[in-house]
């Protein structure tokens, strides 16, 4: 029952992130005409993630991102079996969010935005996509460790707000370059719904590299030694 509870929290938490994020992108198309711009899209993702962490951080840790889960796995803070269950739950949450957005919004909006799949600019090379996604996910994972793992950061009590802001500024900085996924589940849900897999591999590889690098740097160098304990398993 405990595993079911945390997996349900990961499912709903990922939905919290993906539904408003995808919806904001679709609303920004001419077919809907909300004119949110990249600031609105960044806020939708950032606020959704912040609330997911506030609501579910105490249940599952609110990873809501396979790269984050793999980053924690690399530091021994979650066991492999539970990590796999988290990732499956996250992918299901993202796919459900994408599917409901596809039902709610006009077909013209879905087609114009490709259901909000994070994709690179036409001028972005493979190297640029990988580098940008690694950097953005590195910053995200560092914010997670700094505000939600490190007791010194937790004392400031901004947790989910700080992590959500990181996603928002990452989208402002990199949205026009790569789509600023930072999250394989966020890319997977709409890709599965649209059966569109171009570039999809990069949105797994780069976020995982960025998350693992950040987790290792924070865990091995920045955290006090007494904080090196297994948290989930």
Image (spheres, grey):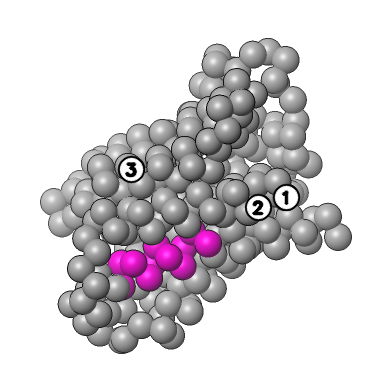
Tag shown at residue 226? none
Q: Disc 2 vs disc 3: Cβ atoms closer than 8 Å? A: no
Query: Where 24 sits versus 162, above or below?
Result: below
Residue 175 position, x and y percent, is 27, 51
Task: Write the start and end of the magenta stretch as one range.
Answer: 16-26
Residue 217 position, x and y percent, is 51, 21
Q: Disc 3 vs disc 1: Cβ atoms closer than 8 Å? A: no
Earlier-in-chain disc, 2 versus 3: 2
User: Residue drawn 61% across and 63% down?
Assistant: 12
Mark 2–mark 3 Cα distance, whole angstroms, equals 22 Å
Q: Is mark 1 on a helix, strand or loop?
A: helix
- Tell me if residue 196 can be seen: no
Q: What element carries label 2?
A: helix
User: Residue drawn 59% across and 42% down?
Assistant: 70
State the residue in front, 192 or 23: 23
State the residue in front, 156 or 46: 156
Earlier-in-chain disc, 3 versus 1: 1
Q: How crowded is mark 2: few (under 14 residues within 10 Å), some or many (20 or more)?
A: some
The residue labelled by disc 2 is 56
Which is closer to the viewer, label 2 or label 3? 2
The residue labelled by disc 3 is 170
Q: Quadrant of residue 9?
A: bottom right
Q: Disc 2 vs disc 1: Cβ atoms closer than 8 Å? A: yes
Quadrant where the image shows the C terminus: top right
The residue labelled by disc 1 is 59
State the residue in front, 126 or 177: 177
Q: Is residue 226 left or right of residue 105?
A: right
User: Residue drawn 54% across and 64% down?
Assistant: 15
Residue 81 position, x and y percent, is 75, 49
Q: In which quarter of the image is residue 147?
A: top right
């Amino acid at each position: 029952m405990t595993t079911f509870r945390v997996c349900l929290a990961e499912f709903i938490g990922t939905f919290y992130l993906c539904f408003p994020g995808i919806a904001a992108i679709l609303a920004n198309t001419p077919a809907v005409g909300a004119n949110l711009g990249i600031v609105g899209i960044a806020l939708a993702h950032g606020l959704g993630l912040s609330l997911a962490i506030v609501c579910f951080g105490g249940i599952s840790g609110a990873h809501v991102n396979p790269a984050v889960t793999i980053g924690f796995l690399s530091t021994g803070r979650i066991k492999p079996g539970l990590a796999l269950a988290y990732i499956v739950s996250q992918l299901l949450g993202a796919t459900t969010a994408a599917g409901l957005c596809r039902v709610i919004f006009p077909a013209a909006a879905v087609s114009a935005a490709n259901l909000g799949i994070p994709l690179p600019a036409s001028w972005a090379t493979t190297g640029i996509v990988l580098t940008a996604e690694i950097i953005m996910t590195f910053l995200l994972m560092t914010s997670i460790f700094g505000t939600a793992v490190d007791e010194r950061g937790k004392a400031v009590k901004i947790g989910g707000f700080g992590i959500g802001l990181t996603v928002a500024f990452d989208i402002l900085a990199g949205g026009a370059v790569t789509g600023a996924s930072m999250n394989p589940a966020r890319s997977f849900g709409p890709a599965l719904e649209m059966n569109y897999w171009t570039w999809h591999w990069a949105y797994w590889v780069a976020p995982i590299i960025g998350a693992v690098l950040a987790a290792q740097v924070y865990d091995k160098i920045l955290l006090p030694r007494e904080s090196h304990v297994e948290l989930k398993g």
